[in-house]
Amino acid sequence: MQLAYAHDSLRLLCETEALLFRDWGELWMSVAVCLSVLAFADTLAEFATLATVTIRRASQPASGVEFVIDHDAFEMRLRAIDHAGRCLRLPDDDRDAFRLVRAVSVLSLKRVAKAVRT
């Protein structure tokens, strides 16, 4: 899948192992592997089968369809784009939409607190 980044600082963070380690500590490898599998997959649907993630459609604003990838203790927000970098319009059915997404722009990465089960 073609990956782009919404901001140069985010691209630099995601593409530089030392920066990922500095900012994400022990989670840096999870972030790096998730990005690698995302780049390897042909579509968002294939990514969902290769990685242990939850993917949900976050919104379809005027700026395009956004998805949230929930993995371990972080979330990655993506926007579906075409190969020219323009926002991609998708059907409402997520199953069909996942098969159509072949390029994404990484909008953000954030830590999330996971509930501990006892």
Image (cartoon, grey):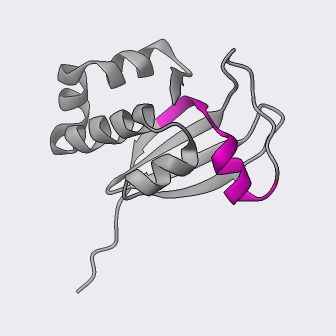
Residue 17 image point, x, y percent: 21, 23
User: On the rendered structure, is 114 left or right of 64?
Assistant: left
Tag count in the figure?
0
The residue drawn where x is 18% and y is 30% is 21
Magenta highlight on residue 109: no
The residue drawn where x is 60% and y is 57% is 56
Question: Considering depth in this image, is 100 or 88 the residue closer to the camera?
Answer: 100
Question: Considering depth in this image, is 90 or 79 the residue closer to the camera?
Answer: 90
Location of the C terminus (image quadrant)? bottom left
The residue drawn where x is 22% and y is 44% is 27
Residue 116 image point, x, y percent: 27, 75
Residue occupying the far bottom of the picture: 118
Residue 16 falls in which quadrant of the image?
top left
Magenta highlight on residue 101: yes
**Is residue 97 shown above or below 63?**
below
Residue 33 image point, x, y percent: 28, 39
User: On the rendered structure, is 90 left or right of 37?
Assistant: right
Residue 117 falls in which quadrant of the image?
bottom left
User: On the rendered structure, is 107 left or right of 72?
Assistant: right
Residue 66 image point, x, y percent: 66, 42
User: On the rendered structure, is 16 left or right of 42?
Assistant: left
The residue drawn where x is 56% and y is 22% is 6
- Give the residues drawn in magenta, as a range: 92-108
